[in-house]
Image (cartoon, rainbow, N blue to C red):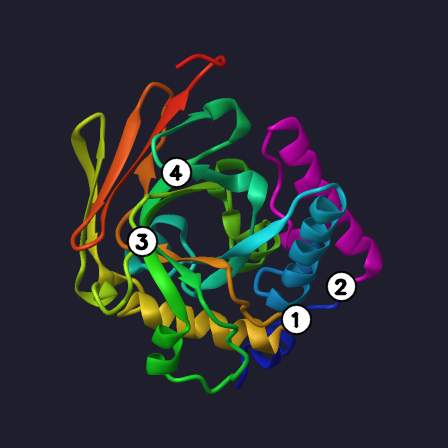
């Protein structure tokens, strides 16, 4: 069964008013930086189809307001992260330009609600991926280069009390992301064989491997390519793809500097500030 078919099979009866309320609830939480109730009471706990509709409406509103689509993120690819948040299937969200930071950035913690960090491998695409039966080799061939990344996930749902429809509607619990400066061709870097270590002010807070991401970050990319096509929005050249966590989520606190080291790829660093100061 395809992803949309499975989603439809699980869908509950949702009215246009339910969709409106779900959008409003998540947008209000983001506007006020105060988390709110889950949206599964409106959508159903496993209704992925309508949850993506809510996600798409929120993203469309942001783009209408001036934001630019720059890529996608794959969420919940690591078993460790799935256990941490209580969801057992991958999902995806949209990356916008105002979510992006460069290596070494200082990020005001006030722009986030309940942030957690994960180290990932980012892929930038050289070519569109439009074949739903794309092979792993073809997926690799569509990648221009890989970079180390830290994704800071966030939730507009209070206490991270999420099920799959909550996180999907909430743009896969996206926050912000930081890309490292390294840009390696896949001829020089094997994602599956990488090892990850993340520190907070020099103290180790997370470890993992490329294989922890759906067995291979390129398999995660293939899953996203297939799923995106089924939802009518194929991956395009130039997009940044965050392929998913290589290990457990780490805490984010003001005054802390996180550094993720990925063997063969290099490091990426971000510092969180409070009150507009470094």
Q: Disc 3 to disc 2, how far (Cα)? A: 44 Å
Q: Mark 1 highlights which residue?
A: 11
Q: Residues within 10 Å of mark 1 (few under 14, many from 20)?
A: some
* Closer mark to the observer between disc 2 and disc 4: 4
Q: Which residues are magenta?
A: 14-41
Going 76% across and 63% down the picture, which residue do you hit? Answer: 14
| Residue 188 rendering spot, x and y as whole percentages | 20, 64
Going 34% across and 47% down the picture, which residue do you hit? Answer: 149
* Earlier sequence position, callout 3 versus callout 1: 1
Which circle marks residue 183 in the picture?
Answer: 3
* Earlier sequence position, callout 4 versus callout 3: 4
Q: Residues within 10 Å of mark 3 (few under 14, many from 20)?
A: some
| Residue 21 rendering spot, x and y as whole percentages | 77, 47
Asked if the residue at tag 3 contacts the one at tag 4, i.e. Cβ–Cβ closer than 8 Å, the answer is no
Magenta stretch encompasses residue 29: yes
Q: Residues within 10 Å of mark 4 (few under 14, many from 20)?
A: some
Secondary element type, mark 4? strand
* Closer mark to the observer between disc 3 and disc 1: 3
Res 239 visible: yes
Secondary element type, mark 3? loop
Q: Mark 2 highlights which residue?
A: 14
Q: Disc 2 to disc 4, how far (Cα)? A: 31 Å
Asked if the residue at tag 1 contacts the one at tag 3, i.e. Cβ–Cβ closer than 8 Å, the answer is no
Q: Disc 3 to disc 1, how far (Cα)? A: 41 Å
Going 59% across and 49% down the picture, which residue do you hit? Answer: 170
| Residue 186 rendering spot, x and y as whole percentages | 27, 67
Q: Mark 4 highlights which residue?
A: 116
């Amino acid at each position: 069964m395809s992803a949309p078919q499975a989603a439809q099979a699980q869908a509950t009866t949702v009215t246009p008013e339910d969709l409106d309320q779900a959008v409003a609830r998540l947008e209000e939480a983001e506007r006020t930086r105060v988390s709110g109730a889950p949206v599964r009471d409106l959508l159903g706990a496993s209704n992925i189809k309508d949850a993506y509709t809510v996600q798409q409406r929120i993203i469309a509103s942001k783009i209408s307001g001036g934001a630019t689509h720059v890529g996608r993120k794959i969420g919940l690819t690591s078993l460790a992260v799935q256990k941490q948040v209580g969801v057992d299937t991958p999902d995806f969200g949209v990356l916008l330009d105002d979510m992006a930071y460069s290596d070494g950035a200082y990020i005001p913690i006030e722009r986030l609600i309940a942030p957690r960090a994960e180290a990932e491998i980012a892929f930038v695409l050289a070519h569109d991926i439009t074949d739903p039966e794309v092979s792993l080799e073809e997926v690799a061939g569509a990648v221009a280069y890989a970079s180390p990344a830290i994704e800071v996930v966030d939730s507009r749902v209070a206490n991270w009390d999420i099920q799959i429809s909550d996180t999907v509607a909430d743009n896969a619990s996206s926050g912000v992301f930081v890309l490292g400066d390294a840009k390696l061709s896949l001829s020089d870097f094997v994602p599956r064989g990488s090892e990850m270590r993340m520190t907070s002010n020099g103290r180790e807070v997370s470890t993992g491997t490329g294989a922890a991401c759906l067995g291979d970050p390129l398999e995660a990319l293939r899953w996203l390519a297939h799923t995106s096509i089924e939802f009518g929005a194929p991956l395009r050249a130039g997009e940044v793809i965050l392929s998913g966590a290589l290990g457990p989520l780490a805490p984010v606190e003001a005054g802390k500097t996180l550094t993720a080291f990925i063997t063969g790829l290099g490091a990426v660093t971000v510092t969180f500030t409070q009150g507009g100061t470094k």
